[in-house]
Structure formats: structure tokens, C-alpha cells
Image (cartoon, rainbow, N blue to C red):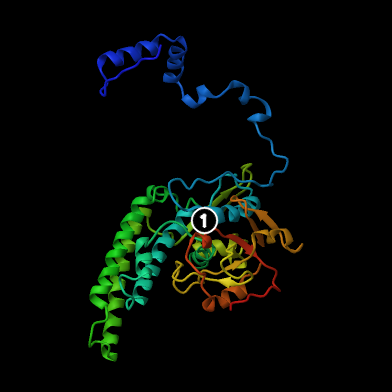
Amino acid sequence: MAATTTERELTPEFLDSIHESFTSDSKNLLAVNACVRNDVHEVLTAHSVTRGDTSHHTFSHVVSGECKAADQKSSGRCWIFACLGVIRRDIIKEHDLPADWELSQTHLFFWDKVERCNHFLEVMISTLDEDVDSRLQHHLLSDPINDGGQWDMLANLINKYGLVPKTAMPEAWTSCASRKLNWLLANKLREFASVFRTQCGVTDGEDTFAAKAARGHKVRTLKAEMMEELYRIICIHLGTPVTKFDWSVRSKDGKSFKRYTGLTPKTFAEKFVKFDVNDYVSVINDPRNEYGQMYTVAHLGNVVGGAPFATSTRPSTSSATLSPTQSSTTSRSGSVATSASSSSARKASSTLPSLTTTSSAARRSTWTRRPASATVRAS
């Protein structure tokens, strides 16, 4: 019999009645005995669905040389893990390494933090004349640094800093849980942006050549001091970067052993990595902008002096009409990544038109590799 009460408070009489109602049902007592000692999810799973094909899936098509999945843990490094997961397959196959062998994600993560801090400071310097209450400044300062990234940012890091095995720079506590580091860096970057404004901003009567020269010198002096502090913070959280290392390789069967000494991240990438990140560009579907064009997003990037963000727009249905010479694979998000040379895209990227907004459409991109004969339009 269901307990009832007209009181607003939980009275002892009402609590006694609902307790008696619960304990009088043997099914409730059985549930208590089962769930107190076991995972509720496991207890509630019907035994009939744990047998046969309903729970033990076998795929009709299996990718050869499949590697063990890597874990980005509590961080936004999916873009780094995705690329390194592709690159490591060839290394594992060539050297007969275990399926769980990995390249160091922390190596690229470290340099991305350093470069992104520098990129943000440069953007703040270039927009010193912008009204501090402008929408642009609000956008830039709302999220000065985070873990996310896209293809050109990754290519810039690998081109400049190379790659290393995970044994050379393993995971740090903060690389697996980056929220507090991002919070600290974001607040420091906002602080430094304010310093630029207060110490290097343009004031009335100071727009002479001499004033501009003095202001430029002050900006560069301040930025050097800021980067030294930011670098110290990143090193403390992620460890110091790899400069030279040795790599010992033993095959899975234990019969082959090799040791490579005196490697640098750049020489390791040149010697052992066959995947060329410069052969790929991003492709997005953004119907607000004209298809078949290369676009960029203002102030989006990490490495100052590297290739800026460049993406090609194409209809989402265009994957059905890809050239037979293009190889295509399905990404984890279900979109199609196709293979194509991006050299012309990188040459034209400095004059690319911007997307109409900086919305998340630019982030939902896949990698594309076009035939060498393809042309890039940057109108």
C-alpha cells in the first residue's frame, strides 16, 4: 500500500511507512543484496543479451595492421592523437613493433602551448589600435588558449619540431588533465594583453616616428619577458622538451634489436616517418561560402611564420563523385577524408579570403589530399 502524507515536512511517521513499504517487498530486498555488492549496470543487464552476436561483434572488414587505441584522457588533444595514430602505423609495420607503440603526443602538445602563447601575444600586438571593447577583442580574450586544433596547426608543429617516440617524452600529469594549465595560461595571457594596452598603447600626441620606434622596442622587450614566464610555466607542468635522445627497438618476436643514438626530433621524423603532413589540407562543408574555394579564418593558428589555416569548401555530397585516382577513408566522425597535394594551397594561403564567421564550421574539417595537377583558387 502506497504511503501518503499531507505534511510539507518529512515526518518520522511518513519515513517509517515508506521504509516498511520497501522492506515488505521481497524483490526490493533481493535488489538490495545484488546492487550493494555489484555494479548496478551489470546487475540490470539481461543475461540473454550477453550471449551470441548481440554482444560479441565480429566485423566483416578489418584494417590490417590495426593499432591499439591511444587514450587522450582528460584533454582536448584529439587532433594530435588522430594524426599520430595514422603516422605510427607505418613505423609499427616497418619495425615489427607492438600494437601499443606510440609517438609522443606530449611533445607536440608542449610546443603547441608555447607557440600558441606566442601567437596570441602577436595578435594582441597587431590589434593594439583596436578598441578594447570591440567584438574582435572580446572574441580573442574570451578564450586565449585551449587544447583544440586543426590540420595546418598540426603540420606547422611537425614541420618545425619533428616527432619523438613516447618513451622520449611520456605523458605528464597535466598533459592528461590540462584544464588547470589552460586556466593558468589564459589568465596570464589576459594579464599580458592588458600590460600591452597600458604600457604600449597609442596616446594623443605620440604618433610620431620616434614614438612608434620607442613603442615597438618596448613591445618586443615586454614580449620576450612574457614568453620567458610562459615557457617556465609550461615546462613546470609538462616537463622540459626533448633535444636529443636514443631509441631502442625490439621486434615483437624478440629476434631483432636495434639502437639509434643521438637522434633529434627533426632527424627522427626525417629518418622514420614516411607520412608527409604537407601533402594534406582541410576540407569543410560550409554552405554560407562559395564552394571550390580556399578560405582562412583571421587570427586562427599557432606557429607565427608557419602556414596559416587554409581550408577548402565543398558540398557534403561531393564525396560520392570523387575521382577514381583519389583514395578515400571514413573518419571517426563519419565524414570522408580524401587524399591531395596542398603545396599550391600553402603558397596562396597568405591572400586567402576569410570565412564569413569564425563559427565551429571551420573546426568540423577533414583532411584532404588532391592530385598534384589540382589547382587552388584563392579569390
Residue 133, relative to residue 65: is it above or below? below
Residue 256 appears in the rendering: yes
**Quadrant assignment for the N terminus:** top left
- Numbered-mark total: 1
**Residue at left 49%, top 72%?**
306
Specify whether 234 is left or right of 310: left
Q: Nearer the viewer, residue 354 or 98?
A: 354
Specify whether 328 is left or right of 143: right
Quarter occupied by residue 140: bottom left
Q: Nearer the viewer, residue 155 or 368?
A: 368
- Residue 267 lies, in percent from the top left, at 53, 64
- Residue 20 lies, in percent from the top left, at 35, 10
Residue 253, relative to residue 311: is it above or below? above
Mark 1 nearby-residue class (10 Å; few <14, some 14–19, many ≥20): some
Q: Amino acid at mark 1?
A: Trp
- Residue 291 lies, in percent from the top left, at 63, 69
**Quadrant assignment for the C terminus:** bottom right
- Residue 350 lies, in percent from the top left, at 52, 77
Quarter occupied by residue 313: bottom right
Quarter occupied by residue 2: top left
Give the residue furthest to the bottom. 209
**Element under label 1?**
helix
Q: Nearer the viewer, residue 64 or 341?
A: 341
**Residue at left 27%, top 73%?**
196
* Residue receiving disc 1: 79
